[in-house]
Amino acid sequence: MAISEEHAGRSYPPTAPYEVSAAKITEFAAAIGDANPAYAGEQPLAPPTFVAVIASTAWESMFDDAELELALRRIVHGDQRFSYARPLRAGDRVTAALTIDKVRVRGTAEIITTTARVETVAGEFICTAGSTFFHSREALT
Amino acid sequence: MSAAVVVEVGTALPSLTVRLTRADLVRYAGASTDFNPIHYSERIAARVGLPGVIAHGMLTMASALRVVTDWAGDPSKVIAYSVRFTKPVVVPDDDAGAEVVFTATVTALRHGVATVSIDAACGGVKVLGAARADVDLGI
């Protein structure tokens, strides 16, 4: 059975703890071409959109959910919304838990709205990452 | 942003032009762990109906926020950030890549929080919609 409106409300267990490292922050900041000094030094902050590194692991729990019959190459990111209690810092150990908020089926496409809640392993809330994904169902050769 | 700078509705932030090449997409794929092949394979991109290899929406989103954090200085002032990916940024397999121009304006100011609206254009086409960052000015 493919993804349908009935999958709204489905939640996935939190991802395995991810430790934010200074090295990964350096790599990410370089990849987005951002030389902000806050991302360097002894106690670097992670760029705000670094959260996607952790959220994407949570998105994978949904993409890999065999029951939903989703194919990564047929998924397009429609929108992204972050709301932060504080920035991630090197040394934070965090998890992300994904919930499917809403599914709309439009012909051969599905519009999937999700929220990933990111918190530290100690339970401190860091941010939410809300996303909309468009998935096309067309059989492809 | 120095304390002497007056922030009001209508304040324009310094704009930013970013050039994205295939090498940048490969680098972002590795850094972000987003290995969707539409961001590196012409063949797969064509197969799913895209006009070519496209940049990760999240890379465009990250680049757009640099306009705000370059201005605000401290990225921890960003308390919310959202975008809609309206058009793909097609990145050709050449040295020039795709040029994206980001401009931004303060569109609201409430309780010390500035809402900055960001425009992103590639080849004159708007690639982000409703891009907004809330910045806590701490005032």
Image (cartoon, coloured by chain):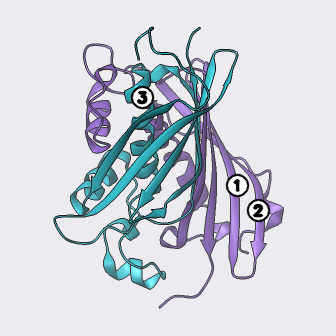
Q: Looking at the figure, which quarter contains the N terminus of chain A?
A: bottom right
Q: Is residue B27 above or below residue B70?
A: below
Along the line of sight, the residue nearer the viewer: B136 or B56: B136
* Chain B painted colour: cyan
Q: Is residue B134 above or below residue B29?
A: above
| Circle 1 chain | A
Chain shown purple: that is A
Which residue is pictured at 55% across the width and 67% down the height? A75
Horizontal relation, residue B20 to residue A107: left or right = left
Q: Which mark is residue A103?
A: 2
Which residue is pictured at 43% across the width and 64% down the height? B124
- Pinpoint residue B111: horizontal percent, then vertical percent: 70, 15
Circle 2 — which element? strand
- Pinpoint residue A49: horizontal percent, then vertical percent: 46, 38
| Circle 2 chain | A
- Badge 1 is on which residue? A113
Circle 1 — which element? strand
Along the line of sight, the residue nearer the viewer: A13 or B67: B67
Q: Which mark is residue B30?
A: none
Q: Which mark is residue B69?
A: 3
Identified by mark 1, the residue type is Thr
Camera-nearest label, 1 or 3: 3
